[in-house]
Image (tube, rainbow, N blue to C red):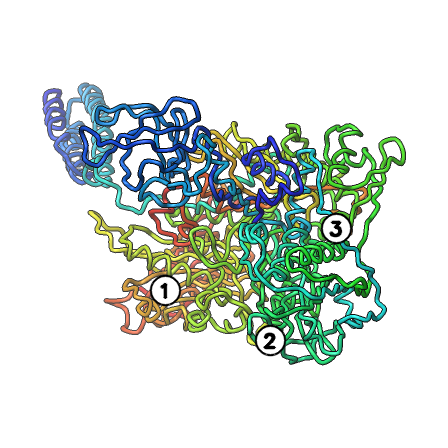
Amino acid sequence: MKISLQWLKKYVDLDGISVEEIAQALPMLGLEVEEVESTGMKPLKGVVVGEILSRQAHPNSDHLGVCMVKVSEGGEDLQIVCGASNYKPGDRVPVALEGAELPDGKGGTFKIKASKLRGVDSCAMMCSARELGLGDDHSGLLILDSRPEIGTPINEVFSDSDTVFNIEITANRGDCLSHIGVARELAAKFGRKLALPELKCSPTYSDVPGEGALKSVELQTPNCPLYTAVTIRGVKIGESPQWLRRDLEAAGMRPINNVVDVTNYVMLEYGQPLHAFDARDLRGGKIIVRSAGEGEKITTLDGKEHELTKEATLICDAEGGIAIAGVMGGLNSEVKPDTADIVLESAYFKPGNVRATSRRLAIFTDAAYRYARDVDPQGVFDASRRAADLIVETAGGRIEERALAAGKPPRGERSIDITLDYIIDRIGFAVSEGDAADCFRRLGFSVEQTGAGAWRVTVPSFRSDVDRPIDLVEEFVRIWGTEKLPECGLESSVSTRDDDPLFTFQNAAADFLAARGLNECKNYTLVDGARQAKTWENSSALRLENPLTSDQDCLRASLLDGLIDCVRLNFSAGNYFLGFFENGKIFKADADGTIAELASCAFVLAPDCGQRKWKTRDAIDFNSTKATAFDVLSILGINAENLNFKPLSGGFWEEGYAAQFGSENREGFRAQIGAVSTALLRELGIEKPLWAAEITFKPEVPARKKGVAKFKQLSVFPPAVRDVALIVPADKPAGEVAAEVSKIAKAKLKGRDFEAERVALFDCYRGKGIPEDSKSLAFEISMRSKDRTLQTEEVNDAFEQICAELSKRFALRG
Amino acid sequence: MEKKISEILERFQERLPQAKTKGEIAQIVAGVTGPNGELTALMKLIPTLDKSERPAAGKLINQAKGKIEPMIAAAYGRVESAEMARALGPKPDISMPNFDAPRGTVHPLTLTMRKIAQILCKAGFTVAEASDMETEWFCFDALNTPADHPARDAQDTLFMPRGAKVSNVSKHADELYLLRSHTSSVQIRAMLKEGAPIRIIAPGRAFRRDTVDATHSANFHQVEGLCVDRNVRLTDLKATLDHLFKSLFGKSAKTRLRPSFFPFTEPSFEVDFMSADMGRLSNRWIEIMGCGMVDPKVLENVGIDPDEYSGFAFGVGVERVAMLTHSIDDIRHFYANDVRFLRQF
């Protein structure tokens, strides 16, 4: 909102307070200043009106002239060298005297000094408009055609200078959406007096039918608790006076005609939106405020037709809609060049209702903005009277004595009891009784002492946001000045609470994966739903209701797509990397569309990012990917060694190169490990294979209680190791064979006083000596006793029994 | 005999150092002490000697063996060391560049969140988490922002369709699911679950319906802070913020509270800070975050008695802190994940 300093000064004396001080005070009151704009001429010292007495050619220059200039009556004339050519002796021009500071056009100033120009003394400077900061004209000197007195300070010639503050008002401060509102704040801050306009007319408000143009007002909806109308007859529509046009333009509004300009002016003055109807167009002499019918249509002032819903509030005459309440007037009843009688509406509409209607119809007007921020019910009357005064002043006419008012002000003054102790208890530092009460008084609140350090504070109706003692504390702090808050040390009590285990897990996983050489990523939670639907099932349920763009219209179902995009970006940037990981939230929908928010930790490994190396390593493969994934699982508190992974294919994964275990609903987590679908990669323009894994889990999984580990004695005796190799079909999963070997070893050692400490697969061989469709799996069985060295015989005996059992199911090799 | 023995030893001493492998050593040793070895042959001669000479001869041979044994052990030691050294491969050029990918990195936003968590941990705060998916009640109503409140305008929110079902976030029948527009919803969840006193921070994602540009992102990160206890005052909020910003931006950092408005705090403030260690941004006020004293209505909404307890809350943008800390000029760097960017922190 644009606030003109010149306009503000009508209500508060800001003498002696600089623009900078005001610009610094406003934000500390809670009125954020987005921009300070100076219009007209800035205050310039040492620039006066001078008259050119003579011009002579410069001895050393074709384009310079040497002038004698009179800058004061009775003073010495000045010799000035000048490069312009648009003047003649007798012209009056601005002259910057020695020591004057002119704007340099970059926000700073430069100082005028007496000097020599090509050998000729020049002791001042005649100025162009641009040199005075008045626009861009630099084609020649600024000739002062009005011939002001010689020696007049230039600011007196260009006296319409102004400063406009563009202020951002927070949602709670509807009262500051006006010049009076901002003036009130500055008056409070600087301890100055607020002077409100004198209201001359004072019509008699009543809800009984009058005799004039308007016979009745009927309120049929709670969304309009108060409606007033003043009738003015015999106005002459025309142009507004200069002062009014200037003020409106300074505040960023375009003048239209005197009546409309006054309604706008008073809105910017009091914050109360007003609307003038042409009295001729009020059919039946009636105003009815009601909810719109579903589908009811109205054409607004801007010529657009709107279809309303029943939530909208409509101002109607006897036959139909004439304005959308609080939003915009109707075309059918607007003030026209030949309008003579007007009905001036001033009302209170419920903020929420105006806001909803304005949003639904996408009509954002200054009026709707103010109504939505809760106007002052008392201001409904004041602004109406002020506007009537100004209409009579600018457009003539006569105010009808009887004015209509229906309903009641929804808010008046409120009394709040508060004590000094309460204030001090909230702010934490001492303040005197007098200082506290003074802050409230300066804001225009009335303060009544009710006891020692206790007051009853009465808050006027214009402050919709001050209802409770805590609200008064805020007012105190604002006016007292937060810069005066004392520096205090931290006072903390001990906390025995733990960090959320999800946070702890994510940190540990990030450190681990980074130590493995991977780079952590952050990708957007919102993704392109169409793309995601190709890879992840049920993702159509993850679409947003109101996405901003189609490439971010859906919740992500996996972290992997984002990681693949990172790989692609880094590939194309020619970067050298091993892989990427991310910790974050994902969303999964089941077949019936129910969404679950899950935590996820995922990584992608690039075996080859195209970097040439002077030495090679074994490439990343399924097993190295799986090993990293298992380590992450163990950080999550899950021992993955014994999990029964099943082959995984489709969507994101390459058939035959991927595996998964678990479900978030059953085990609380799911792990997927494997090669990324080569078809998918090629579609994305990635020409190199990638390995990936994702562990998704319910966010509460890291908080699961882990059992306390119990120490098991270490044997000091050596193990006895025996190897056995089995020939199995080539496509038989080794894990199944290993499980069986373990089981048999355990069973065959049952009852003995030593155990199979470890059964480990150490070789997998295909080729010579093994049938074509088979493979050899070699296991090492390590046996150990906790209290003695094992004898060869007993180890052999046990091993033979194990082999005998194994040979029933597998072919033993060699 | 004596002469023969010393000849054998001499030859042995000569040949042994030439052995390159354990096999060669064994061969040389066998040539002396093996069944067909020279010393063994001499041993076999003893019975043929005169009885009086036998003890002396035996002694000489045993002495010779005694000399040989440590030599053999030394030879084996020499060869074994050489073998192990061979397993190290050829001697490297220590100036060759590393060719494995360099150490991985933790994302600057994670680092910033950790740093803030560590700083506030000293002031007694611990980390709380809650869902990104929220309901209108948790995100707005409980935070004193009713449906027709203008503050709901400013927070342009991303909603799920009316019929959306979410298994692990429950809602009232007529509510909409949404993506939380601020992490303040965690305050509500934490206070409902844990009551007062409470002192938490909540690092996490928040979502706005913003067009992506250099300073806006469809999702961003915040660290929410909440402290509710007996006698928590405005000066405690200020002290906490001073601690935070001095720790983040240097001892010279100071803060100022600029009155503002949030529905869930009263009074409410924007926080500006100023530090001498900010490069070209030094010694000027920089807007950084919002904060305030928890509105009594919010405490009531979660069943905490506002006459007994008071508190403060704040929310700081993680991207903003990271951008200021590291002089990053565009928020999109955080989400592009170019390793040349990621490796700088």
Residue named by callout 2:
A299
* Amino acid type, residue under disc 2 in the picture: Thr
Residue named by callout 1:
A675
* Lateral position of residue B249 relative to residue A574, left or right: right
* Amino acid type, residue under disc 3 in the picture: Leu
Residue named by callout 3:
A199
Q: Residue at x 48, y 31 (%)?
A: B283
For residue A349, which quarter of the picture?
bottom right
Instruction: State which chain disc 1 sits on.
Output: A
Q: Position of residue A107 (x, y in %)?
A: 42, 37
Q: Residue at x 52, y 27 (%)?
A: B251
Q: For numbered disc 3, what is the local secondary structure?
A: loop
* Amino acid type, residue under disc 1 in the picture: Ala
Residue A167 visible in the current orientation: yes
Instruction: State which chain disc 2 sits on.
Output: A
* Lateral position of residue A416 relative to residue A585, left or right: right
Q: For numbered disc 2, what is the local secondary structure?
A: strand
* Lateral position of residue B120 relative to residue A407, left or right: left
- Distance CA(mark 2)–CA(mark 1): 62 Å
- Distance CA(mark 2)–CA(mark 3): 34 Å
Q: Are marks 3 and 1 on the same chain?
A: yes
Q: Nearer the viewer, residue A760 or A537?
A: A537
For residue A10, which quarter of the picture?
top right
- Of the image marks 3 and 1, the number of the one nearer the N terminus: 3
Quadrant of the snapshot with the C terminus of chain A: bottom left
Disc 2 and disc 1 in contact, CB within 8 angstroms: no
Q: Are marks 2 and 3 on the same chain?
A: yes
